[in-house]
């Protein structure tokens, strides 16, 4: 399985970015997908997840109401629309594919494939 994340960049506070993550290697539509992020000097943290059908989504409290996760199974792609960005959203963002039955969706240990990360920098 390969996950290719893109869409990061530099944006001013209050701005928006849309991240994409294209998957290949196994049936994309069968798996929950997630986004995590890691800021300098901090541990990687959960951002959002979406079930295989797209019918259920989960968000960290810190991004709820500002970020939206979605997926297009025909394109093997998961997205993260980020609005009202804040300097504290600055991090490397990783997409990941969850292993079925692996526990809570917010735990990184339940995800067995990871993208390479894309840098998001929000200036104040």
Image (tube, grey):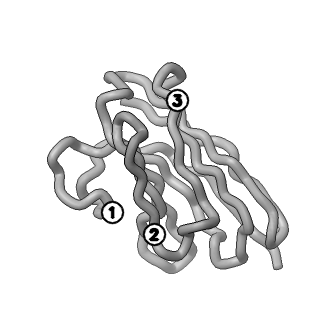
* Mark 2 / mark 3, whichever is N-terminal: 2
Q: Are marks 2 and 1 in contact (CB under 8 Å)?
A: yes
Q: Nearer the viewer, residue 17 or 93?
A: 17
Identify residue for label 1: 106
* Mark 1 / mark 3, whichever is N-terminal: 3
Residue in the image at 17% along x and 51% along y: 102
SS for tag 1?
loop
Identify residue for label 3: 72
Location of residue 26 in the rendering, given as x and y in whole percent from the top left corner: 32, 23
Residue in the image at 51% along x and 45% along y: 116
Report whether 105 appears left or right of 37: left
Report whether 38 appears left or right of 43: right
- The residue carrying pointer 2 sits among few (fewer than 14), some (14 to 19) or many (20 or more) residues within 10 Å by Cα, namely some
Location of residue 15 in the rendering, given as x and y in whole percent from the top left corner: 81, 63
- The residue carrying pointer 1 sits among few (fewer than 14), some (14 to 19) or many (20 or more) residues within 10 Å by Cα, namely many
Residue in the image at 33% along x and 22% along y: 27
User: In the image, is residue 86 above or below residue 119?
Assistant: below
Identify residue for label 2: 60
Report whether 79 appears left or right of 104: right
């Amino acid at each position: 399985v390969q996950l290719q994340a893109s869409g990061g960049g530099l944006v001013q506070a209050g701005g928006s970015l849309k991240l994409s993550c294209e998957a290949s290697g196994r049936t994309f539509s069968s798996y929950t997908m997630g986004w995590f992020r890691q800021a300098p000097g901090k541990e990687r943290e959960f951002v959002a997840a979406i079930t295989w059908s797209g019918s259920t989504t989960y968000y960290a409290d810190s991004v709820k109401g500002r970020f939206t996760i979605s997926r297009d199974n025909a394109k093997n792609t998961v997205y993260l629309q980020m609005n009202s960005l804040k300097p504290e959203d600055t991090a490397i963002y990783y997409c990941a594919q969850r292993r079925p039955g692996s526990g809570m969706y917010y735990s990184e240990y339940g995800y067995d494939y990871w993208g390479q990360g894309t840098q998001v920098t929000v200036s104040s």
